[in-house]
Amino acid sequence: MTGPGVEAAMRLAVDQAQRVKGSTYPNPPVGAVILDAAGDVVGTGGTEPVGGPHAEVIALHAAGERAAGGTAVITLEPCNHHGRTPPCVDALLAAGVAAVVFAVADPNPAAAGGAERLRAAGVTVTGGVCADEVAGGPLREWLHKQRTGLPHVTWKFATSVDGRSAAADGSSQWITGEAARADVHRRRAAADAIVVGTGTVFADNPTLTARLPGGSLAEHQPLRVVVGHREIAPEANVLNDDSRTMVISTHDPDEVLRALSDRTDILIEGGPTLAGAFLRAGAIDRILAYVGPILLGGPIMAVDDVGVPTIARALRWSYDGVERIGPDLLLSLVPG
């Protein structure tokens, strides 16, 4: 079952998933939309924090009796297991929906099988609708964790057109504009952890919090992680009460990832030394480069040694997105 109405509903479900991203850990951020028998939207929902209802249940509750004979549009195949909450398949069958459309099949063996059970009960089931959009959007990091067992690591940085992260005197506020900085805070609010090195803490004294456009703290704050052997002063901003902080006395990316193995979505925001170490270790899954239309020159680069002695051994990446954000560009790259 596909068509413009269903695809529009799926994009609405994606919006619901994006809204809850960062608050559902360790569950995936899922969005759901209920269409009545006439194809009108009668319910929407996003998965609540762990222990709360899943997206389908929230959307069905909003739809009420109008869900009967309608269509459930969901970003992830409905779960078919009893964890902290009952299976979503049970709720869909009890509501009497006639069709279920989902984007991505559930790779978790414990939760999979929802589509098969729905079909066996006579429900029309269609998978793969807007799958690339969902897999590369709200479920990107969770799907990576399911496939590899490792957290998804994104290196995020701001750079001038000539690849500098600061001017020659060390000043860097601001390379990019207000819209790009707001986008960074939105991504921080969706992340499980932000990692920096002690060099960044000493140089910039960052708070590493996620803030709303008005400057207040976002509801969800990521774990702040500081990597390195130097001792941090108790009055450092990164140790304030705005969020929790983990200090890891190492320079080894593998040790960092082991310490954060229970997390799903990790942002690397450290300086050139930390970024270089993670790149040399092959521990970066995505690059987000915010490029400001300025030239800085000077010696302060966005990244140090990445282990490339010759062009023949360059680290090759592929663009999977280019977006204009105010006067700046956001480049998204993945390995290969």
Image (spheres, helix red, strand yellow):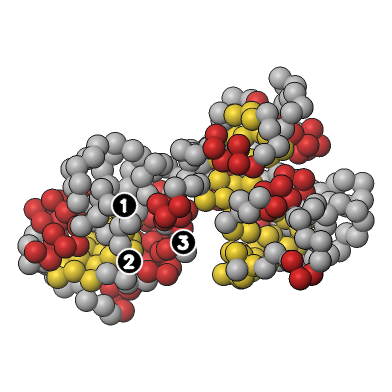
Residue 201: horizontal and vertical position, in percent?
74, 34
Q: Nearer the viewer, residue 333 or 203?
A: 333
Quadrant where the C terminus sits is bottom right
* Mark closer to the chain start, 3 or 2: 2
What separation in Å lies between label 2 and label 1 (alpha carbons)? 15 Å
Q: In the structure shown, which secondary structural element does the residue marked by tag 1 occupy?
A: loop
Q: Which residue is tagged 1?
A: 108
- Disc 3 secondary structure class: loop
Quadrant of residue 179 in the image?
bottom right
Alpha carbon separation for disc pair 3 and 2? 11 Å
Q: Pointer 1 and pointer 3: residues touching (CB < 8 Å)?
A: no
Q: Can residue 64 be spotted in the picture?
A: no
* SS class, disc 2: strand
Mark closer to the chain start, 2 or 1: 2
> Which numbered marker is on residue 103?
2
Residue 129 quadrant: bottom left
Q: Is residue 121 left or right of residue 79?
A: left
Left or right relative to 180: residue 264: left
Task: Check disc 3 and give the amino acid type.
Answer: Gly
In the rendered image, residue 261, in percent from the top left (x then y), is placed at 49, 39
Q: Which residue is mark 3?
A: 137
Residue drawn at (60%, 38%), measured in percent from left and top?
256
Question: Counting residues from the N terminus, which is met first, the one under dot 1 or under dot 3?
Answer: 1
